[in-house]
Structures are given as C-alpha cells and as structure tokens.
Amino acid sequence: MTRNAHMGSADNTVWNGVWVGCEGAPTSHCGNQGGGPNTTVASSPSVLEKPYIVFMNNKYYLFRPKHEQNKVGITANWQNADAIDFANVYVAKHTDTAAEINTILRERDVVAVVFQPGIYHLEESIQPRRNGTVLLGLGMATLIPTNGNAAIEVGNLADVRIAGLLLEAGTQHSEKLLRFGSTVGWQPSSPGSINDVFVRTGRFYSSSAEVSADTMIEVNMNDTVIDNVWLWRGDHDKFGLVKNSMNPTYTGLEINGDNVVGYSLACEHTLGDMLVWNGNNGRAYFYQSEFPYDVNQQNYGDKGYAAYKIGENVSIHHGYGVGAYTYFRDNAVTVNSGIKTSGHGGVHFTNSLSVFLNGNGQCNHVIDNAGATSRNGQTPNWVCDYYGGQSLSEEQMFLQ
C-alpha cells in the first residue's frame, strides 16, 4: 500500500495494490478483469502521521504531527506539527522498569517517552496519563509483559500516539498486548493513532517456554487512526516450525470503536478470526492475511473462522484491497470464506481477493458466499464490488 505520495509512475502490483491520497497513482482496476489489480482512493480521510525527531536551532525536538482530513499528497517541509521540547521527553533505556516509567509519566511534566533500542521486560503495563502523550520506539524497541499484563494500556485519553514499537507476548498469558481506550465507544476530543506497531507471539528465548495472548491489539476508542500494523503469530520461531497450535493467539486486531480508519493492516496465523471489526463506519485501506499453517478442520475450519470478520451489528463499513491468503501447511482445512460480513447494505468491499499460496485445503469463497474457490492449481480470485450480501456486475456498479 502507498499513502499520500507524489509519484511520476507506479510499478505493477501483484494481488492487491492500494493507493490512497497519492498524486500520480494508477487508475483503479480489478484483478479479475485483466491488467494490474489496483485500488485507488482519491484522498486519505483521516491522517495522523508518525511522530519524529528533528534537530533545529541547536536543539532536539519531538514533532507530533497534527490531525489532517481528506489529505492528498505529501506534507512539505515538516509543516503542520507541534514541536515538543526534549525537556518534556523522557528517553527510556531497557533497564527501566514499567513502574519507573509510569512514575515519570504520572509525576513529571513529561508528555512523551522515547524508547531507545532494547528489550524491555515489563512487570506492569505502560500507562499514559495525559492527553497528547507520545510513546515512540527507536530501532524496534521491544516491550514484553512478564506478569500476564498488557504491554501498553491507554485509558480514555485524547490524541495519544503509539509508534515504532514491537510488542511481544510473554510466558505468562496476557488477555491483550495493547489496549487503546478503556471504554468501548469513548469519544475523544481529538483522535489518537497507532503507527508502525508490530506484534509477535513465538518462542524466542527458550524452546520450552510457550507464549500466549488472546488478542494482540484491541481498539475501543472512536476515531482512532491505525497506520501500518503487522500482527504475527509465528508459523516459525527461533526453535523451528510451530505446530499443533502452539503459542496460542486468537485475534490479531479487534476494533470496537466507531469511525476507525486503518491503513496497511496485516494479521497472520492467529487461531481464531484474525481481524474482528465490531465498530461502525470503519474504513480499511489494504489488508493482508495468511490463515494459520498448523490447524486442522476440527479446531479451525468447522468453527467458521475468517481472516476478516465484520460484527453482526455493523451497518456501515468500507474495505479496499482486503486479501486472505491460504496456506494450510500441516492438514487439509476448508474454510468457507476469507471475509465474513454482517450482510447489511451499508457494508461495502472493493477489490477483495483470496489466493492459494501452498499446502492443503482451500478457501471456498472470497467474501461470504461470493467469489470462486482458492485451491491448489487455481489463480487468485477477486470480488470487485460487494455490497451487503451481493456481488455486483459491472452494469450494476455503473447504476450505483
């Protein structure tokens, strides 16, 4: 996916290229109609760019970009951002405890924590206390909960930014690894964001120490912007292939807030519905997923899990370039569809696809009961436009 770029040209995409708010982007074109599978959206509806560090006037500043709506193209010359003096920034080191960091956030005039590269073992959740707090990782700083806690818990606060971090499940089971908003449907005065945050579950320290978490990221707050997350239950880890549903994690991303916008989302190999979207009026621009490699028909296929599931009470949702990739490595598993919707008429998907990568089994449909089967020997399958339970022909799309 490419967002808010200025391009002279664009290379061909493979299965589901998505361009949002890009000047010079290719024309939209569904993959099953010949030519490149491109989905082009004129503007980005809600944007909170990732915070970044700037050196100017012989001082360092942390820049927190401002909220932008209906954005096209780039932001020139570092404009449209608030500068935070490093006098109000705490630079954490891997030997800091979570309690020490939380005390600093609570008692000092600190509005941001920059995590230096390192592995942070957290005996309690990092908990922002002020509106506008920034938690920014450098060099993929890694946060690991040690007591069954979340790595980060954001309460009902406005304009909180979480960026540039790797969250990793610990050997004590966690319900969530990142909870964004403590109350479902809480309405902030200004939206917060999750930028470039990656989550993994796997054995990376001991071959005998399994790790687990129910959900990697839970978003309860309305209007949140999610920009580039990769949520991975490992199909392999440091000690080899992962088999027999080890290191259980059931959902990568659960969105319960309304009006949430997601750019470049990826969930892989979790043991339940990989992405669950319960909030209304959500918008997703590019989604990539792979079904778990090590499940069987009884514990996965028969339970009706999907790569992308819309909650039954959702009446409005828009998905662009949503893909479900099939590789049942260890057993022959059949799933009915890559995407499951609520069936409401305001649920709209553009250029959805499923594709067989390798292995066994199949995915019967792309979305609900629409789209061809993805199995060994078949080419990728697309459903170009799908409205609330029906796949539309080109003539019907024109009449819309």
Image (cartoon, rainbow, N blue to C red):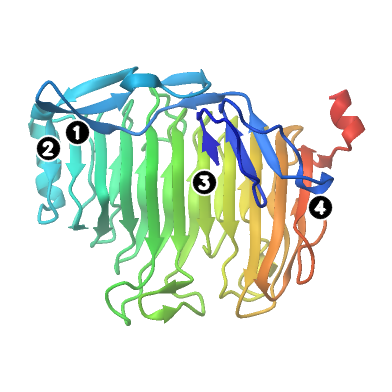
**Which one is nearer the viewer's eye here, 235 or 189?**
235
Horizontal side of residue 339 vs 391, given as left or right: left
Q: Earlier in the sequence, mark 1 or mark 4?
A: 1
65 shown above or below 34? above
Determine whether label 3 and label 2 are within 8 Å by CB. no
Q: Residues within 10 Å of mark 4 (few under 14, many from 20)?
A: many
Amino acid type of disc 2?
Tyr
Q: Earlier in the sequence, mark 2 or mark 4?
A: 2
Secondary element under disc 1, as helix, strand or loop, is: strand
Picture residue at 44% right of the left edge, 20% below the top: 68
The residue under label 4 is 371
The residue under label 2 is 90
Q: Earlier in the sequence, mark 1 or mark 2?
A: 2
The residue under label 1 is 112
Picture residue at 32% right of the left edge, 39% below the top: 162
Q: CA distance from mark 1 to mark 4?
A: 47 Å
Locate residue 254, reporting x and y percent. Answer: 50, 47
Amino acid type of disc 4?
Gly
